[in-house]
Amino acid sequence: MKVFFIKNRSRLLLLICSVLLLATGALGQAQSSPAKERENTSESPDIEHYLDRLIATAVVAGDSANAVKEADVYRGQANQKLKSGRRDEARALLRQAGETIAAAAPEGDAKQQDPFLREYLREITKELVALDAPTRSFGVAPIDGGFVAGNYSAQPRVAAFLNYFQGRGRSRLEIGRARLASYRPMMAQVFREEGVPEWLLSVGFVESTYNTGAHSPKAAHGIWQFIPGTGDRYGLKRTAWTDERGNPEKSTRAAARYLRDLHALFGDWLLAVAAYNTGENRVATVMHRTGIRDFWSLAERGLLPQETINYVPAVLAASQLLLGNTGAVAKSGRQSNPSESRTADSIKGSSDETDEQISRLREQLRELPDQIVSGGKRITNPEVMRINKEINRLTAESRRLKKANLAASQEYVEPEKK
């Protein structure tokens, strides 16, 4: 498939160049004869306009071909890693290839409409999804609403939305809860089948409050607020009589697949949520330019749109309030003390949260170059240094929490039976 597109792109470029030469010759002949030019003054502007369009098309095609050439280097290296069984390294290289293609067409760029780039990115995404498939069920199983809420409820932006949804936004929360009650069994099953964690059902709340008829000024429609282009990509048909973006089950399947693909591309659910809001091209452009692959770092530096900086915390807050799993205390061979159980659960939740943060940071670290070029010199990547420092801090914190958890679990001893 890749060779097919590259060969056809080469033929297209040759065809464009040929047409440009013919058009240039025609324009030159028209300009060389004043009498003829006066006779065809109404046609000359059309020739010039046509020539401008051909040149613009050739420029877009050339830029797209350069992006594909760069991405192909990563893709070829990924294939070599796969042949030697090094899946993680192959995955990181494929993500670099996808990032290169997505970043080649930032917001408003004509290349966003280039079918060649779109198809090439779709192929890379499919390969990444296939690489994730063997571990998908394992990776998704423990990530329920309570798990995620425990990770981020103390984050200031998430805490602000928790307060809002329990205060001024409470009426919207209750409307969303009532609507979700009828959709949740279907939605949860679809998300599980597509390998997407259930807490991401809260994306539908932030998008539309689970309103199938919601319609935005940007022509986004339905629970998951698909714009026409993205809806078409994920098989949502639109006719004069029906719009499948408003179909709860079909649009939920499309949203799950879109989120799954975004996660495959970026390797992080928070970045996937950010890209769902602002588009993968914009997120990839910022990551490609800065080398930063952590949502909170991007948000703190103001590198994403303000809407997106608020959108992700809103999804996390909604996941806790609508989908949170308080969980039951694990049964043991001794009688439980309610206050002791709450303390142990709290400490264990914090410990699990810390371990998950370490895991995410290590995954980010694997995808970053150890060195970068700055001022003509190769230096240690500052982002690598920052992440290593954070991992060391969290590792020490995890040890402390596990010791505290052990102490809390031994604090209460069942009285001897008489």
Image (tube, rainbow, N blue to C red):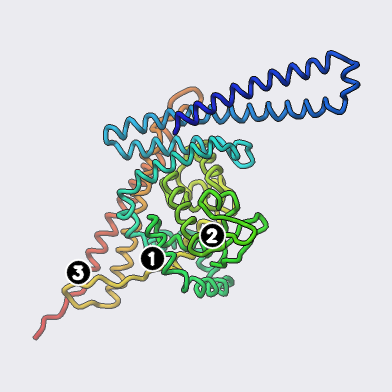
Amino acid type at circle 2 is: Trp
Q: For the residues labelled 1 and 3, say whether their Cβ atoms are less than 8 Å apart.
A: no
Nearer the observer, disc 1 or disc 3?
Answer: 1
Q: Which residue is mark 1?
A: 146
How would you rate the neighbour count of disc 3 (Cα within 10 Å): few for under 14, some for 14-19, many for 20 or more? few
Task: Determine crowd level at label 2: few under 14, some 14-19, many 20+ residues with C-alpha closer than 10 A.
Answer: many
Q: Nearer the viewer, residue 114 or 150?
A: 114
Does residue 277 lie above or below 172 as drawn?
Answer: above
Query: Nearer the observer, disc 1 or disc 2?
Result: 2
Give the Cα distance between marks 2 and 3: 47 Å
Measured from the top left, where is residue 323 in percent x and y?
43, 68
Residue shown at 60% from the left, 52% from the top: 228
Q: Amino acid at mark 3?
A: Gln
Q: Compared to 388, does 138 lie above or below?
A: below
What x and y, as percent, mark residue 196? 40, 56
Local SS, label 3: loop
> Does any portion of residue 355 appear in the rendered image?
no
Depth order, front residue of 326/370: 326
* Residue at numbered disc 3: 410
Q: Secondary structure at mark 1?
A: helix
Of callouts 1 and 2, the N-terminal one: 1
Pointer 2 residue:
224
Cα gap from disc 1 to disc 2, whole angstroms: 22 Å
Q: Looking at the figure, which quarter contains the N terminus?
A: top left
Q: Quadrant of the C terminus?
A: bottom left
**Which numbered tag is attached to residue 264?**
none
The relative height of residue 277 versus residue 333 in the rendered view (above or below) is: above
Amino acid tagged 1: Gly
